[in-house]
Image (cartoon, rainbow, N blue to C red):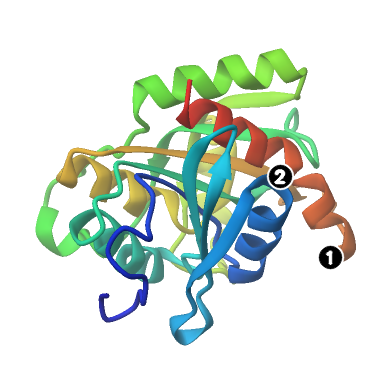
């Protein structure tokens, strides 16, 4: 057990999917895993371990934002031996050709600040995905016929941002979408020498104002979870 994860030794699989929302972790575990068992509920941040096609998988909520994800990812890697961590979650589309319900596979994750900034100090570290996971995820998405975009995303440290000038420059430089966790996950994976990837479903769009209704979000996330699972065990 750790301060934030109540799982016993052996309860956490080497492959962990990390949605931000603990109830999305519950939905994904009940939908995609066999024999899913609750292994963590400390502070309501639910985690489940089961099997997918015979492989052990843990789906653990990370909370919103890089500071929250940093807590869980650090403990999963350092204390429970997690080797492969895949963020599954929603993001906001930023490019005109990126549509609602499309999947973004994040090659890189830019950010202004993150919990690791204090360690890296003046270095503009470039957090990136594990290549083997990235390649496998693209293959899985193409095999499913899922409309997918591969490239850079932006991990924001605020949800209600008020920087239209920054948004304009990110669009200009090809950033596909915005979310709040992947940059720190990629940085921590590099530090611990583990594999990490973010597979994201576009739930709203910063340019068009389109957004998925709340009741349609979970039903639209199935492709993302399947792609993440297939990539992890390719």
Whichever of callouts 1 and 2 sits on the residue coming sooner in the sequence is 2
Image location (x, y in percent) of residue 105: 55, 32
Between 150 and 193, the one nearer to me in the picture:
193
**Mark 2, residue position:** 202
Give me the C-alpha separation between circle 1 and circle 2. 13 Å
Can residue 14 be seen here? The reply is yes
Give x and y (percent) for residue 201.
68, 43
The reply to whether dot 1 and dot 2 touch (C-beta < 8 Å) is no
Kindly identify the residue that appears in the image at 75 percent across and 24 percent down.
147
The residue depicted at 30 percent of the width and 49 percent of the height is: 82
Numbered badge on residue 60: none
Q: Secondary structure at mark 2?
A: strand
Q: Is residue 33 above or below residue 52?
A: below
Nearer to me, 215 or 98:
215
Q: Position of residue 222 (x, y in %)?
A: 75, 42
Is residue 69 left or right of 179 when viewed as pictured?
left
Name above or below for residue 97 compared with residue 179: above
Q: Residues within 10 Å of mark 1 (few under 14, many from 20)?
A: few
The residue pinned by badge 1 equals 214
Q: Is residue 215 left or right of residue 131?
A: right
Mark 1 or 2: in front is: 1
Q: Residue at x 12, y 53 (%)?
A: 120
Position of 154 relative to 126 (above/below): below
> Would residue 147 be found to the left or right of residue 196 on screen?
right
Q: Residue 177 appears in which quarter of the rendering?
A: top right
Dot 2 surroundings within 10 Å: few (below 14), some, or many (20 or more)? many
């Amino acid at each position: 057990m750790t301060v934030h994860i109540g799982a016993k030794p052996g309860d956490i699989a080497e492959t962990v999917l990390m949605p931000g929302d603990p109830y999305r972790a519950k939905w994904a575990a009940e939908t995609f895993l066999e024999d899913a068992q609750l292994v963590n509920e400390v502070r309501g941040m639910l985690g489940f371990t089961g099997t997918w096609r015979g492989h052990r998988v843990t789906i653990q909520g990370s909370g919103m934002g890089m500071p929250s994800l940093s807590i869980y990812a650090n403990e999963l890697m350092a204390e429970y031996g997690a080797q492969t961590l895949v963020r599954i979650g929603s993001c906001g589309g930023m490019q005109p050709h990126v549509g609602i319900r499309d999947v973004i596979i994040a090659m890189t994750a830019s950010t202004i600040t993150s919990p690791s900034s204090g360690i890296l100090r003046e270095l503009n570290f470039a957090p990136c995905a594990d290549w083997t996971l990235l390649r496998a995820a693209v293959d899985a998405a193409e095999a499913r016929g899922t409309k997918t975009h591969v490239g850079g995303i932006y991990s924001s440290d605020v949800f209600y941002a008020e920087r239209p000038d920054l948004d304009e420059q990110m669009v200009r430089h090809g950033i596909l979408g915005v979310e709040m966790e992947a940059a720190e996950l990629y940085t921590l994976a590099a530090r611990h020498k583990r594999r990490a990837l973010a597979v994201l479903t576009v739930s709203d769009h910063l340019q068009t104002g389109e957004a998925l209704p709340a009741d349609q979000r979970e039903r639209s996330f199935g492709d993302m979870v399947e792609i993440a699972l297939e990539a992890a065990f390719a």
